[in-house]
Amino acid sequence: MADETLSHPDASRTPHGSAFDAVEQGPRRSDEPARDLASVPTAVPSHPSVAALRAVFGEAIGAHQLHAGDQHVVFVDAARIVDVLEYLQQDADQQYAFLLDLTAVDYGGGKPIQVVYQLWSMAHHRSLRVKVELPLNALDVASVVPLWKTADWLEREVFDLFGVTFTGHPDLRRILMPENYAEGHPLRKDFPLRGRFSRAEQTRRALGLHVEDNYTDFEMGVGRDPQLVAEESDGSLPGDAPRAAPDAAPDPAGDETSAAVPQAESE
Amino acid sequence: MGVNDPEATGVSLPGGGTSARASGDVGSGGLFGTGGPTFLTTKLDWVVNWSRRNSLWPMPFGTACCAIEMMASAASNYDLARFGMERMSFSPRQADVLICAGRVPYKLAPVLRRIYDQMMQPKWVISMGACASSGGVFDNYSMVQGIDTIVPVDVYIPGCPPRPEGLIYGLMMIQEKIRQERLSDHAINRAEDPLAAGHPRASESEIEGLTGPFGNSTRQNRVSGLVETSRIARPDDRLP
């Protein structure tokens, strides 16, 4: 028994295969046939949160996978994602209070775009990655800003670069690309590397962007007394006025007219 | 000061006899040399250019790793102040040289153009590093393929990033360019169309030519005819 442990230190600890198996076997010779990784047993160890999710939500919980050795991934029905995440955040046995990251992946070839919620439970010291698959013709998913405020800019980023619309987001605008960007969503796999427009057109549009149009008076008044700025405008407190209604956010297809965000403050 | 400067050699005050005192002190060269009388404008050229090129205040437009080298150039080891770049002017209206150090995405292009437009004449522009000069490795949807499509550029500094010596060399090329300027040419050199503010420097066809499949870097030579390089002289070209 002791000899076996010495010869295979991980054998007793990982009955299932892991993503590091190929790494531990070392590099493959060029004339060696490709290893059949499918033959490696890939039973996924149980994860307490996934088991609880299956008990609560049943059919809404899809595949459970293990990535990179220890990252548990669970696929969730897009229609139930807010319920699932709210449960994970609120339930006393889960307490995923920290949304580490919200991003998306496009695997190309017409495959659905995956929206990824990377969760961390500080109470239970536990990690879980929740994924939602959205078909390319229905890139809509409910916003989780009411659950985690940090999702605000992250969802804007996913909207900007992948074109996923988060319904219920308070201010769904482009965040990285210019407001008048009209070439689509750059991180899609079908997006050409150099963009869709010519360089001359890209340059013309870039210099045609009036930066001031996208900021309120308060945001433009950097370094000035906010009270003074408020009195100079219509007397309302700075930041009170809504920037733009969520349904007035730029169209995913995008053009110049839709990119014009209405000025909240008077001149 | 400029005793050996060829521009000053043979320059004297009008009615050259007044420079007898200076000729004894300074020798045959210098501002009060013993050369024959010449035109006042020549001397004014020299004085203006001398003061301009030795008090170039850079406007640092640092967006990436090139800015780290730019900061190193200003620090004590390399000490840009030796050459008159005494003060990094973070306000464009008090700056002479725009040093664009780093990659410029399209979203930043109007900012760069605005800062250039806000600078007072005379002004010069240095494109520092591969990204600012040609887009560098970032030949993609978001990156300006060389800031010379946005603003006129006087000196391109190659490197990724260039060492501080490279930046100082580029600034000395600006000094050399200033040294060769003539006040009489300024109406041409410094003319700026107010309607050009906020617009690309290059025409559409020129931008397409500059940003071809292999990027701006292959076009920045005299052969292409797309970029004016002939007016820039190296500091080595100084006469002894």
Image (cartoon, rainbow, N blue to C red):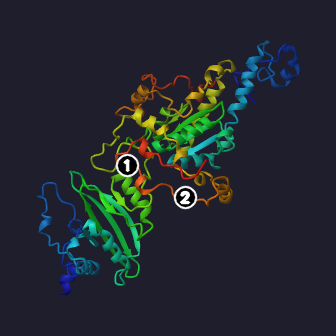
Label count reads: 2
Does any portion of residue A43 appear in the rendered image?
yes
User: Which image quadrant for residue B40?
Assistant: top right
Nearer to us in this view, A216 or A96 = A216
Q: In terms of image quadrants, where is residue A76? A: bottom left
In percent of the image, x 73 and y 27: which residue is there?
B48
Horizontally, residue B227 falls left or right of residue A5, namely right
Q: Chain of mark 2?
A: A
Q: Secondary structure at mark 2?
A: loop
Q: Residue furthest front?
A: A234
Q: From the viewer's side, name the closer residue of A211 and B239.
A: A211
- Give the mark toward the camera: 1 or 2: 2
**Residue B147: x and y, percent?**
49, 36
Q: Which numbered marker is on residue B52?
A: none
The chain under label 1 reads: A
Q: Residues within 10 Å of mark 2 (few under 14, many from 20)?
A: few
Q: Position of residue B159 (x, y in %)?
A: 47, 40
Label 1: state its secondary structure: loop
CA distance for labels 1 and 2: 22 Å
Q: Residue at x 49, y 37 (%)?
A: A207
Above or below for B34 versus A89: above
Residue occupying the point 35% across, 48% down: A186
Q: Amino acid at mark 2?
A: Ala
Name the residue that disc number 1 marks: A251
Across and down, in percent, residue B197 comes to: 57, 32
Q: Which residue is mark 2?
A: A241
Q: Quadrant of the N terminus of chain B?
A: top right
At label 1, which amino acid type do we have? Asp
Q: Is residue A33 left or right of residue A215?
A: left
